[in-house]
Image: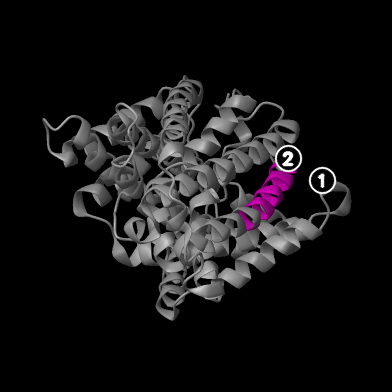
Amino acid sequence: MEAKLKKVLHLKDAVAVGLGAIIGAGIFVVTGVAAGVAGPAFLIGLLIAGIVASFNAISSAQLAAVYPQSGGTYEYGYRLLNPVLGFSAGWMFLLSKLSAAGIVAIGFGSYFHQLVPHLPPLVYSVASIILLTLANLAGIQKAGTINTGIVLITLLTLVYFIISGIGTLKPQNFVPFAPFGMKGIAQSAAILFFAFTGYARIATLAEEVVEPRKTIPRAVIITILTAIVLYAGVSFIAVGTVGSQAMAHSRSPLQLASDSMKFPGINLVITLGASTAMLGVLLSQILGISRMLLAMGRRRDLPAFFERIHRKTSVPHTGILFTAVVILLITLLGNFEFVVRAATFTILLYYSITNLSAIKQPREQQLYGKVIPVLGLAGCLAMSVSLPLNVIVSGIVLLGVGFGVRYLVKKLSPTS
C-alpha cells in the first residue's frame, strides 16, 4: 500500500506554522530598511502592505479550502489556469524559499553566537540545519510541536519588547513624519509586503491539515491579523524609541532600540527572540519546500523520486533531505546574490498567480467572491511597477532555467 501524508495539523498548529514563517528577518531587519526609505511614515507603508497581503491571504485560503493538496499555488495554477503558470508558481517558490532559507540559517548563526560565543557562527548555522532536518524527518506532528514552542518564545520576546519600550517613546522621533512623501511610503509598502508572505506555508501544507475547508481559512486570517498587529506594535515602539534614521543605519534595529530601554534583560531577550525567529522560519522553509518538491514530483515537473513518502513517519523524506543539502550548500558558500535579487519578482509572480487562480474559481467555490482576489492582483501589479529592471530580468532568466529543467525531466522520465 502506497504511503500517504497524514492529516494531523489542527488550527493552532497551522497558525503556528504561518507565524513561524512570517515572524523572522522581516520584523528584526527589514523594518530598518523600510524606515530608511520612508521615515516614520513606513508605519503607513506597513499597514498598506498588510492590507495587500490580507487580500492575497484570503485568496490563498479560499483556494486551499477547495483544493487541499500539497503544493499551494502550484496546484491551483495547474487546476484553474494552465501548466505554464502552475509550474512557474512552483519553480519560483522553490528558488525564493531555498535562497531565503540559506540566508536565515546564516542569520541564526550570527544571533545565536551573541548568546553563546563559544563556537563560530557558521557552526551554529550548520547545526540548526541538521537539527531541524532531523525534526522534519521525525514526522509532521513532532515538527509542528517544536515549531509551536519556537513561535511561542518569539512572540513572548516581542511582547516584552513592546512593554519595555512604552516608557521610552519620544514624540519628536515621529517628526517629520513623511520626509520622502508618498513615493517613500509606496517603496516601504513594497519592501514590507515580502515580510508578510509566510502565511502561504499553511496552504502548501494543506494535505496534512485536519478539516482543511474550515481550518485553513481560519488559520490564514488569524495568522495575518496577528502578524499585522505585532509588526505595527513593534515598529511603533522602535521608531518612538530611537527614530527612523537610527533604525535605517542599523542592521539590527530592534537590538538598537532595546539598548535605550531600562527593562531588565531586554537586550538578551531580543537576541533570544531573533534566534528563535530565525529557527521558526528555517523550520517552516524546510516543511514548505519539501511539500512543493513532493507536488512537483507527482506531476513529473521534477524527478519522480521527490514524491516518495516514508512509510513510518509519513513525510516526504527525499524532498526533506534534498532541501537540507541545498540549504547547507548555500549557507557554506554564502548567499546566491543573483537568486536573492530576483526574490521580489518571484514572490510577486507567485501571488499574482494565486489571485488569478482565485478569480478563475467557479462561483460556488468562492468563499469571498471575486473582489478580494482582484484587489490582491492589483496590489501585486502596482508593487511590481516599482521593481528595478535588473530584478525583473533576473527573475525571467531564472524562470527560463526552470522550464529548461522541466523539459529535461519530462524527456527523461519513463512515465512521460
| Image quarter hosting the N terminus | top right
* Viewer-side label of 2, 1: 1
| Residue 159 point in image, percent of width and height | 47, 32
Q: Which residues are magenta?
A: 52-66
| Residue 318 point in image, percent of width and height | 40, 37
Residue 9, visible in the rendered structure = no
Q: Earlier in the sequence, mark 2 or mark 1?
A: 2
Please say whether residue 267 is one of the residues in the magenta stretch: no
On residue 367, which mark appears?
1
- The amino acid at mark 2 is Ala
Cβ–Cβ below 8 Å for labels 2 and 1? Answer: yes
Q: Residue at x 82, y 49 (%)?
A: 366
Instruction: Identify residue for label 2.
Output: 65
Please say whether residue 63 is one of the residues in the magenta stretch: yes
On residue 409, which mark appears?
none
Q: Secondary structure at mark 2?
A: helix
Query: Number of numbered discs present?
Result: 2
Q: Is residue 75 above or below residue 294?
A: below
Nearer-the-camera pick, 63 or 268: 268
